[in-house]
Image (spheres, rainbow, N blue to C red):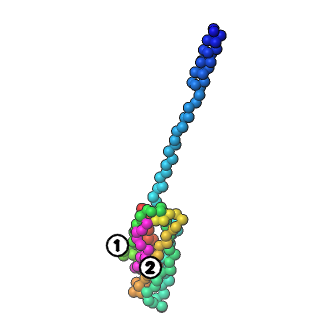
């Protein structure tokens, strides 16, 4: 009987030790999150050039290379511009003669037919701005020969 009792005790202790060492499932979860930032970026800048020939006359439309930009999908954007570095008031744009000794300006019109606001479609779907610009005949008929320039800064904001 003593042998049975000792065997039972040993088996009981082994069973308890096995239960203590048995690993219950230690499951956990990992939360994975992301935040897509709403942003807009120009991907190419544009340019406008004019060939102003007083002998030909007439309104001269600019030769335009349109800028492109993109905005995060679903993000509302607004495009603004600063009217150029030689402006004389809101929308009163003008090009300055590039010779510093000549303080002469040629007014010009500059606008974009692309809506000034909209909703982005993502980086893989850039938006091309359609710029239109012109110089009236009266603004260059008596201008000093040479190069004129201005810089218009476009801003796209989410």
Q: Residues within 10 Å of mark 1 (few under 14, many from 20)?
A: few
Residue at image mark 1: 90
The quadrant of the rendering that contains the N terminus is top right
| Tag 1 and tag 2, C-beta contact below 8 Å | no
Position of 81 compared to 32: left or right? left
Q: Position of residue 148 (x, y in %)?
A: 47, 77
Magenta residues (range): 107-119
In-image side of 131 versus 14 (left or right)? left
Judge whether 105 appears above or below 85 on screen: below
Q: Position of residue 116 (x, y in %)?
A: 40, 71
Pinpoint residue 75: horizontal percent, then vertical percent: 43, 62
Res. 133 mark: 2
Counting residues from the N terminus, which is met first, the one under dot 1 or under dot 2? 1
> Residue at the location (44% across, 68% down)?
154
How many numbered tags mark residues here?
2
Query: Is residue 154 rendered magenta in the image?
Result: no
**Vertical relation: 61 (above or below) 72:** below
């Amino acid at each position: 009987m003593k042998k049975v009792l000792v065997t039972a005790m040993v088996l009981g202790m082994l069973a308890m030790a096995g239960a203590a060492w048995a690993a219950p499932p230690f499951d956990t979860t990992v939360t994975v999150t992301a935040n897509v930032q709403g942003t807009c970026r120009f991907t190419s800048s544009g340019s406008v050039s004019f060939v102003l020939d007083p002998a030909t006359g007439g309104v001269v439309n600019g030769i335009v290379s349109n800028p492109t930009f993109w905005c995060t999908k679903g993000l509302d954007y607004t495009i603004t511009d600063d009217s150029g570095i030689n402006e004389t008031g809101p929308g009163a744009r003008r090009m300055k003669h590039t010779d510093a000794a000549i303080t002469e300006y040629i007014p010009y019109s500059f606008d974009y037919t692309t809506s000034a606001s909209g909703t982005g479609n993502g980086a893989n779907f850039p938006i091309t701005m359609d710029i239109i610009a012109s110089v009236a005949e009266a603004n260059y008929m008596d201008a000093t020969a040479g190069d004129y320039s201005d810089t218009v800064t476009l801003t796209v904001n989410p």
